[in-house]
Amino acid sequence: MNQASTDISNVVKKFGDHPSFVLDTFNEGGTSATQGWADMESTLIKSARNAGYKGSIVVEDSNWGGGLTAGPESGLVKYADQLKAANGKGNPGLIGSIHEYASGADASARLGNEIKALQNAGYKPQIGEVGNANWLGGDKFEERDGATKAVRDNLAALKAAGADILPWKDQFQDGKLRHHVGFSKSDQY
């Protein structure tokens, strides 16, 4: 954790003044909404703020970023007060990021619940990853469209919340896994 804190401090000192820079504390930082997860995120947020960073900070939800879409509770919601305290006063509000890969019949409802829960806890929501490729191990994937359908079903709520949506690079198209870098016209809403 000391090395991660030092790394974040060094990164924001070098790039934090760039107008398009946004800090994401940790990609998929843990499996469940535990105090250890909250303490890790709080430490990283404080490290950025103590280094003088005044820009936006993205915090990815527990459950490997899935929050309520992938597990029984959201770390961002459960520990909102602790994370906000780490962010300090006078700084932009934290951005709560969701990774949307749910494929069940309830995927749309679960994403809707996560969006509402994040807003009620004071976060600007972000879909940090969304994709229709489910990794089965090795080089095997299966196509699942539940996640992309869930995002489409919740577009009105996401737009109303001012949410950002960042499509993940691995997507199925025409029965093949495609690896994309960057954005295309079809990624925009």
Image: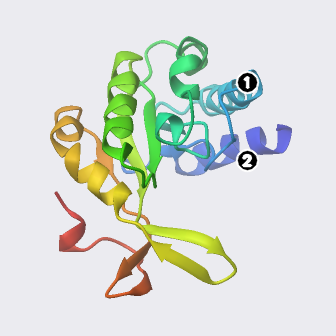
Classify mark 1: helix, strand or loop. Answer: helix
Q: Can residue 187 be seen in this snapshot?
A: yes
Residue hosting label 1: 39
The residue furthest front is 105
Can you identify the residue that label 2 sits on? 7
The answer to whether residue 55 is seen in the rendering is: no
Q: Residue 173 carries which label?
A: none
Which one is nearer the viewer's eye here, 108 or 97? 108
Categorize mark 2 by other alpha carbons within 10 Å: few (<14), some (14-19), many (20+): some
Q: In this view, does 165 lie to the left or right of 4?
A: left
Q: Nearer the viewer, residue 120 or 47?
A: 120
Identify the amino acid type marked 1.
Asp
Q: Tell me the amino acid under the disc marked 2.
A: Asp
Q: What element carries label 2?
A: helix
Q: Where is residue 55 in the image (x, y as percent from the top left)?
A: 44, 35
Q: Is residue 11 above or below residue 160?
A: below
Residue at 17% in and 33% down: 160
Which quadrant of the figure has residue 188?
bottom left
Per the model, the C-alpha gap separating discs 1 and 2 is 17 Å
x and y percentages locating residue 46 in the rendered image: 65, 25
Q: Earlier in the sequence, mark 1 or mark 2?
A: 2
Which x, y percent locates residue 123?
A: 39, 25
Residue farthest along the right direction in this orientation: 2
* Image quarter of the N terminus: top right
Please tell me whether residue 103 is drawn above or below residue 125 in the rendered image.
below
Viewer-side residue, 51 vs 175: 175
Residue closer to the observer: 33 or 14: 33
